[in-house]
Image (cartoon, rainbow, N blue to C red):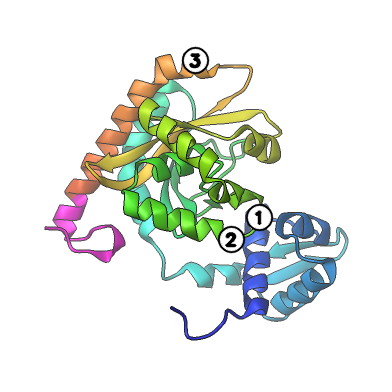
Amino acid sequence: MPSFEPVIALSRGLEILRVLNAERRSTVGSLHKATGLNKATIVRMLETLEHEGYVMRDAERTEYLPTGRCLLLSHGYDQHLWIGGVAEPIMHEFRKQIGWPSDIAIFDRDAMIVAQTTREPGSMLFSRRPGFRFPLLSTSMGRAYLAFCPEEQQERIITLLAAIPGKSTELARQPKKLAPLLAEVREKGYALMDEAYSQHVFDGRVWAMGVPVRDGDEVFASINIMMLHGVISVEDAVRNFLAPLQETATQIARALTDKFRATLWAPGGAKAD
């Protein structure tokens, strides 16, 4: 248990910085919509972050942008890059096989982080770089990870998410909806992106299918295929791509397991046997 109550101002400032990094260019209005904070608080946080050098203001467009100083906050974290490097050649071959882009992502406390991607540079719809954080409960990779991770860990994650306010965590407070959804993912072997999330982030044009990257009960990550509505249906994608996607996940899991044994490193900092 923590010794003190959380510093609310710091929590709000970090939330503003998180959204800024996700949006790349933000306005007070877009930050208000994403965080629910009142606009006066947002302006105060932005001016503080600007003073500290983490944010710059584009006066002509009244927009705010993260600066290179934000990179200093992530210098101590490289697990997603490590896993992404192992997965990259396997994912590259998979992209050539199916023709659609994929991501691999790892769990990070209350969200997922893109570790590697085969999305084409410059694509507006599929633009997500390694290091991008996204929600668990509304995405195919988040759902795939949560459905297949060990039961004790799953319960801890859901409890944590339920305590975080906002639309992205609402499902964690609705166990009668979440439990059947996760059971269905386990039964089918894959998860789908939530339609509301697709509408919010991709204007409803993109959908995704995700599966876990696991070795037995150890879930290292999850991997998806990103596809366009109107080009391929869920039924056709499952029929044509699910088996290759699961095989790719198995190949990555084997490569990661071999790498862990070679380096005596394991997820969560535990030493491999």
Stretch of the chain drawn in magenta = 259-273
Residue at which label 3 appears: 235
Q: Is residue 217 left or right of residue 180?
A: left
Q: Is residue 249 left or right of residue 129?
A: left
Instruction: Write the residue at 62% across / 62% down.
Output: 18
Q: Is residue 55 left or right of residue 40?
A: left
Query: Residues under labels 2 and 3: Cα distance?
Result: 34 Å
SS type, badge 1? loop
Residue at which label 2 appears: 164
Q: Is residue 47 above or below residue 181?
A: below
Q: Residue furthest left?
A: 273
Q: Nearer the viewer, residue 115 or 4?
A: 4
Evaluate whether residue 102 shows in this view: no
Q: Position of residue 190 (x, y in %)?
A: 41, 30
Identity, as a three-letter code, of the amino acid under mark 1 = Gly
Q: Is residue 97 above or below residue 186?
A: above
Q: Position of residue 262 (x, y in %)?
A: 15, 55
Identity, as a three-letter code, of the amino acid under mark 3 = Glu
Pointer 2 local density, CA inside 10 Å: few below 14, some 14–19, many at least 20: some
Q: Are marks 1 and 2 in contact (CB under 8 Å)?
A: yes
Q: Nearer the viewer, mark 2 or mark 3?
A: 2
Query: Residues under labels 1 and 2: Cα distance?
Result: 7 Å
**Magenta region includes residue 26:** no
Residue at which label 1 appears: 166
Q: Earlier in the sequence, mark 3 or mark 1?
A: 1
SS type, badge 3? helix
Evaluate whether residue 149 shows in this view: yes
Instruction: Write the residue at 39% across / 51% down.
Output: 154
SS type, badge 2? loop
Q: Quadrant of residue 77?
A: bottom left
Q: Nearer the viewer, residue 271 or 154?
A: 154
